[in-house]
């Protein structure tokens, strides 16, 4: 089975038909959710505090949906216009940008508290056009990402490397840009469950000894799926009754204001906004 990045450039491969199939496939949704929650665990954002997260290669918003459920504010960028159209139809809260990440990004320095990326990074290693040089594109991407992150922030990339050479090229490009960190491999002995996560830390270039310790990968022993050490993510996944709801009144007011800015018709705010209604039979 050929890899998608060998078939066509991402903006062509993910056309209207592929974008629709990708978003409505229950198996893909389940896998994307698992990897998104694992990326959030590795991102290690402070519990109970708001954060501004960049979703790199956001696609149709599957990972963005996880960010919303966790109460984070986010911005998504993707090269596929068809994927972004699906995300708009799904009324995602995050702002969406059509952007080739290989050309870098123009955010202000220190804008984001963290960044995640699911199943995207390997596309930068493919010279799908004569003008695309993988090393040059990786250099531009990591340099501009480093600038866009707050010092001390993390960037987590789940990706599918084709060979060890790709891993070396990606990691060396990230380290040259100023990041510290490395590769986290979940289920390394499983052919089907094995997952690669590039875990990067910003702000420790001149003091590598102060850089956080690289998280450990998950193993098969006693773990059927992702075993979350983060209490908040664990409660979210189990649907625990003790978990504080993220869709409180402030969340509802923020979403209504966002829809007003986007020109949508929104009901007026009142004392009943976001009030929990009693169940009637």
Image: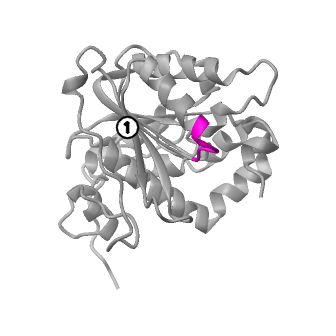
The answer to whether residue 20 is magenta is no
Which quarter of the rendering shows the N terminus?
bottom right
Report the front residue among 22 and 162: 162
Q: Position of residue 252 (x, y in %)?
A: 34, 47
Q: Position of residue 215 (x, y in %)?
A: 29, 46
Residue named by callout 1: 73
Q: Quadrant of residue 253?
A: top left
Q: Which type of secondary structure does the marked residue at label 1 adopt?
A: strand
Report the front residue among 140 and 237: 140
Report the front residue among 256 and 235: 235
Which quarter of the rendering shows the C terminus?
bottom left
The answer to whether residue 162 is magenta is yes
Q: Position of residue 62 (x, y in %)?
A: 53, 52
Specify the principal SS of the magenta part: loop
**In the image, which residues are magenta?**
160-165
Would residue 259 appear left or right of 68 to someone viewing this image? right
- Badge 1: how crowded within 10 Å, few (<14), some, or many (20+)? some
């Amino acid at each position: 089975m050929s890899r998608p990045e060998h078939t066509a450039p991402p903006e062509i491969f993910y056309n209207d038909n592929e974008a629709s199939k990708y978003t409505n496939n229950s198996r893909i949704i389940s896998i994307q959710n698992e990897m998104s929650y694992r990326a959030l665990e590795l991102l290690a954002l402070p519990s109970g505090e708001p954060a501004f997260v960049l979703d790199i290669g956001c696609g149709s918003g599957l990972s963005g949906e996880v960010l919303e459920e966790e109460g984070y504010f986010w911005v998504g960028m993707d090269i596929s216009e068809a994927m972004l159209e699906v995300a708009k139809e799904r009324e995602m809260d995050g702002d969406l940008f059509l952007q080739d990440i290989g050309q870098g990004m123009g955010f202000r320095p220190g804008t984001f508290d963290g960044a995640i990326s699911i199943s995207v990074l390997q596309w930068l290693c493919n010279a799908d056009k004569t003008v695309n040089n993988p090393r040059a594109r990786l250099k531009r991407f990591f340099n501009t990402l480093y600038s866009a992150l707050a010092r001390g922030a993390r960037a987590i990339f789940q990706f599918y490397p084709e060979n060890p050479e790709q891993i070396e090229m990606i990691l060396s490009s990230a380290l040259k840009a100023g990041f510290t960190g490395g590769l986290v491999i979940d289920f390394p002995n499983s052919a089907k469950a094995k997952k690669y996560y590039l875990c990067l830390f910003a702000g420790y270039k001149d003091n590598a000894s102060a850089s956080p310790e690289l998280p450990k990968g998950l193993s098969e022993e006693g773990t059927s799926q992702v075993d979350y050490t983060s209490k908040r993510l664990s409660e979210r996944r189990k649907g625990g009754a003790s978990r504080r709801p993220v869709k409180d009144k402030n969340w509802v007011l923020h979403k209504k204001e966002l829809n007003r800015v986007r020109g949508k018709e929104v009901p007026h705010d009142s004392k009943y906004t976001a009030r929990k209604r009693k169940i009637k039979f």
